[in-house]
Image (cartoon, grey):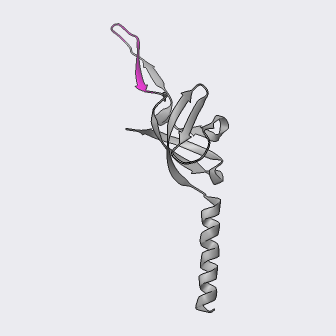
Amino acid sequence: MTTELLGVIQEIVKNYVNAIKMTDKATGTVIKTSPLTIQTDTSLPPISGNALILTSNVIERTEQVKGGAGGTVTVTEGLKAGDKVLLLRVQKGQQFIVLSKIT
Protein backbone atom coordinates (compact mmCIF):
# COMPACT_ATOMS: atom_id res chain seq x y z
CA MET A 1 0.00 0.00 0.00
CA THR A 2 1.43 3.35 -0.95
CA THR A 3 1.86 6.18 1.52
CA GLU A 4 -0.48 8.34 -0.56
CA LEU A 5 -3.27 5.73 -0.47
CA LEU A 6 -2.79 5.23 3.27
CA GLY A 7 -3.13 8.99 3.79
CA VAL A 8 -6.39 9.04 1.81
CA ILE A 9 -7.80 6.15 3.86
CA GLN A 10 -6.81 7.86 7.12
CA GLU A 11 -8.52 11.09 6.01
CA ILE A 12 -11.72 9.20 5.10
CA VAL A 13 -11.82 7.48 8.50
CA LYS A 14 -11.12 10.76 10.33
CA ASN A 15 -13.92 12.54 8.43
CA TYR A 16 -16.35 9.68 9.12
CA VAL A 17 -15.63 9.66 12.87
CA ASN A 18 -16.07 13.44 13.04
CA ALA A 19 -19.32 13.25 11.07
CA ILE A 20 -21.05 10.68 13.29
CA LYS A 21 -20.11 12.40 16.56
CA MET A 22 -20.61 9.28 18.67
CA THR A 23 -20.04 11.11 21.95
CA ASP A 24 -18.77 14.52 22.83
CA LYS A 25 -18.89 16.72 25.89
CA ALA A 26 -20.71 20.01 25.81
CA THR A 27 -21.81 22.67 28.26
CA GLY A 28 -25.09 24.48 28.42
CA THR A 29 -27.38 26.71 30.45
CA VAL A 30 -30.83 25.84 31.76
CA ILE A 31 -33.16 28.41 30.23
CA LYS A 32 -36.45 26.92 31.45
CA THR A 33 -37.42 24.20 33.94
CA SER A 34 -40.94 23.35 32.79
CA PRO A 35 -40.44 21.80 30.36
CA LEU A 36 -36.72 21.50 31.01
CA THR A 37 -34.92 23.34 28.21
CA ILE A 38 -31.16 23.75 27.88
CA GLN A 39 -29.27 26.02 25.50
CA THR A 40 -25.90 24.56 24.59
CA ASP A 41 -22.85 26.76 24.26
CA THR A 42 -22.78 25.88 20.56
CA SER A 43 -24.91 27.04 17.66
CA LEU A 44 -27.49 24.26 18.23
CA PRO A 45 -31.10 25.23 18.97
CA PRO A 46 -32.29 24.74 22.59
CA ILE A 47 -32.69 21.11 23.71
CA SER A 48 -35.74 19.75 25.56
CA GLY A 49 -38.05 16.75 25.91
CA ASN A 50 -36.83 13.30 24.91
CA ALA A 51 -33.52 14.75 23.75
CA LEU A 52 -32.49 15.16 27.42
CA ILE A 53 -31.53 12.26 29.67
CA LEU A 54 -31.11 13.24 33.33
CA THR A 55 -28.76 11.59 35.80
CA SER A 56 -29.50 11.41 39.53
CA ASN A 57 -26.99 14.24 40.03
CA VAL A 58 -29.42 16.77 38.56
CA ILE A 59 -32.78 15.44 39.79
CA GLU A 60 -34.17 16.98 42.98
CA ARG A 61 -34.27 14.50 45.86
CA THR A 62 -35.56 15.09 49.37
CA GLU A 63 -35.58 12.82 52.41
CA GLN A 64 -37.79 12.72 55.48
CA VAL A 65 -36.03 13.63 58.72
CA LYS A 66 -36.83 11.18 61.51
CA GLY A 67 -37.22 12.17 65.14
CA GLY A 68 -37.26 15.65 66.64
CA ALA A 69 -39.26 18.18 64.67
CA GLY A 70 -39.32 15.95 61.57
CA GLY A 71 -39.69 17.58 58.17
CA THR A 72 -37.68 17.10 55.02
CA VAL A 73 -34.18 17.93 53.91
CA THR A 74 -33.01 18.48 50.33
CA VAL A 75 -30.33 15.93 49.47
CA THR A 76 -29.89 16.93 45.83
CA GLU A 77 -31.09 20.21 44.34
CA GLY A 78 -32.81 19.99 40.99
CA LEU A 79 -31.98 22.21 38.05
CA LYS A 80 -33.16 25.81 37.88
CA ALA A 81 -33.00 28.54 35.24
CA GLY A 82 -29.49 29.93 34.92
CA ASP A 83 -27.71 26.73 36.05
CA LYS A 84 -24.67 25.79 33.97
CA VAL A 85 -24.56 22.06 33.15
CA LEU A 86 -22.13 19.51 31.74
CA LEU A 87 -23.63 17.47 28.91
CA LEU A 88 -22.58 14.35 27.03
CA ARG A 89 -23.80 14.29 23.43
CA VAL A 90 -24.86 10.80 22.29
CA GLN A 91 -26.60 9.16 19.32
CA LYS A 92 -25.06 11.48 16.74
CA GLY A 93 -26.21 14.56 18.65
CA GLN A 94 -29.84 13.43 18.89
CA GLN A 95 -29.72 13.12 22.69
CA PHE A 96 -27.78 14.71 25.54
CA ILE A 97 -27.10 13.20 28.97
CA VAL A 98 -27.14 15.92 31.64
CA LEU A 99 -24.24 14.79 33.85
CA SER A 100 -23.99 17.52 36.49
CA LYS A 101 -24.13 21.18 37.35
CA ILE A 102 -21.01 23.26 36.74
CA THR A 103 -20.03 25.81 39.35
How many marks the image carries: the answer is 0
Depicted 67 relative to depicted 8: above or below: above
Query: Residue 76 falls in which quadrant of the image?
Result: top left
Image: magenta residue range: 67-77
Q: Quadrant of the C terminus?
A: top left
For the point 41% across and 26% down, which residue is it?
75
Image quarter of the N terminus: bottom right
Looking at the image, which is closer to me, 81 or 61?
Answer: 81
Is residue 44 rendered to the left or right of residue 41? right
Looking at the image, which is closer to me, 82 or 43?
A: 43
Q: Is residue 63 left or right of residue 22?
A: left
**Vertical position of residue 22 compared to residue 97: above or below:** below
Verify whether residue 78 appears in magenta.
no
Q: Is residue 17 above or below residue 92?
A: below
What's the residue at 64%, 62% (across, down)?
A: 19
Residue 10 lies, in percent from the top left, at 60, 78
